Amino acid sequence: MNYEMPEEIRLTQQMVQIESSNPGTFEAAMSEFVYDWLQRNTSAEIFREPVHPGRDNIVAILRGKSRAHNLTYICHMDTMPAGEGWEHPPLSAEIIDGKLYGRGSCDMKAGLAAAMLAFRNLSRLGKPLNYDFQLIATVNEEDAMTDAEQAVRDSYVNADSYVLDAEPTDSRIQVAHKGKTWFELTTYGKTCHASMPQHGGDAIAAMAEIITRVNRKLAELPVHPEMGACTATFGTIRGGWNPYIVPDACTATLDMRLTPPTTNARSAELVREAIAEGLVMVPGATCDCTVTAQRPAIEKDNDSFLLAALRKAVTNVTGGELPVDFFPGYTDTAVIAALTGCRNCMSFGPGSLEQAHRPNEFVPCWEITRSVAVMTRLAEDILF
């Protein structure tokens, strides 16, 4: 017997089958798909807003009685590259045992599909809205997150907006974000024959001393009661010429995730202290340190209007409550909160962040359906 597949599942499949990897093919094909779909299915005003050459945010607006506030659903179109190790072809969007597989299925084309359909549902009702209702489909979230910065510069979101992204949240409402500071460290020494290391300076040894001290100092920082401890990941490291030469250079990258009260400024100070102490252990070594990106932590606001409205919508759709906690990564809504001071920025969407960026990424189909219902109900509650 044949069954008609729900439209939210079909829409997610269509978008997973469009490659939009960053770096890679980027989002042009996805942008055209989203733009055309919104034109065909809604009565919204639709705009292409350039972020980078050939890479545009797509913005759809249903105008309301007042622009003092707006309700904005923001979802990114780019994905990480597929990589190796897939059992299911990464662009096939296969459905097996109720799970839709493919690169970007949970991060975050399922969430984008849910937002698009909720936006369409409100458009079809044809009722006057209290506030503007906006859907923003963004580019470059998986890299420097210039997408959300551009949305702020273009004045689509501000301190009075209600902003929801549909990132995969593990059946939770996530209202806070760890901060982050990214560093690139390069130590310098002096080459010589490995049999006479006293005549050189080992840049890799210097880096090892610095790494040890960063981790030690990080463990001494305060632990947030909800978001936990600060963390550090030295994601890449390279240096040396061959096993028999004392290395004269070593470069490492550091991804530091921060929980209050630790600030970006304090994280940079900590790394500088670790560098100074580490270099003492390798005479003659030096180190250059560059901060390549930084974002502040965003704390939970228990008095948030959007949080109360989202909890109510979840309860009405599901018949129960979902946990409220923090998003371990950084999202478009966190960027908007940091840049504007908006206290109504949060995440709720289908899938698990544990599946993101991995081979055989998947999203449970029923979670996509639930997200459409919750996001539709939320919009109705706020806008009517």
Image (spheres, rainbow, N blue to C red):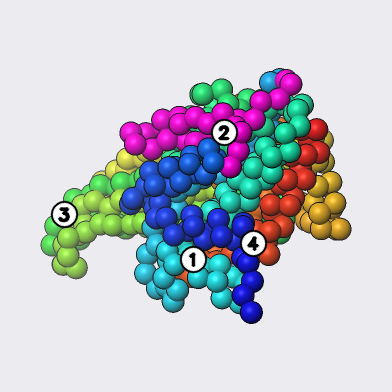
Q: Residue 162 got which mark? A: none
Kindly report the distance in space between the C-alpha atoms of the residues bearing marks 3 and 4: 64 Å
Residue for badge 3 = 191
Mark number displayed over residue 60: 2
Kind of element beneath mark 1: loop
Q: Earlier in the sequence, mark 2 or mark 3?
A: 2
**Considering only vertical position in the picture, is 93 above or below 53?**
below
The answer to whether residue 215 is left or right of residue 9 is: left
Q: Earlier in the sequence, mark 3 or mark 1?
A: 1
Residue 147 in percent (x, y) is at 48, 36
Q: Amino acid at mark 4?
A: Pro
Q: Residue at x 78, y 56 (%)?
A: 323
Q: Nearer the viewer, residue 98 or 296?
A: 98
Label 3 Cα crowd, 10 Å radius (few <14 / some 14-19 / many 20+): some
Q: Amino acid at mark 2?
A: Ala
Q: Residue at x 41, y 32 (%)?
A: 51
Please name the amino acid that badge 3 sits on. Answer: Thr
Left or right: 2, with 213 as reference point: right
Q: Is residue 159 above or below residue 288?
A: above
- Which quarter of the rendering shows the C terminus? top right
Mark 2 and 4 residues: CB-CB less than 8 Å, in contact?
no
Residue 93 tag number: 1
Of badges 2 and 4, the one in the foreground is 4
Q: Is residue 43 magenta?
A: yes
Residue 260: % across, % down: 66, 41
Q: Which residues are magenta?
A: 41-66
**Distance between the alpha carbons at the discs numbered 3 and 1:** 52 Å
Q: CA distance from mark 4 to mark 1?
A: 14 Å
Q: Mark 2 or 4 closer to N-term?
A: 4
Tell me the SS state at disc 4. loop
Q: How far apart are the alpha carbons under marks 1 and 2?
A: 26 Å
Q: 268 and 300: which one is in front?
A: 300
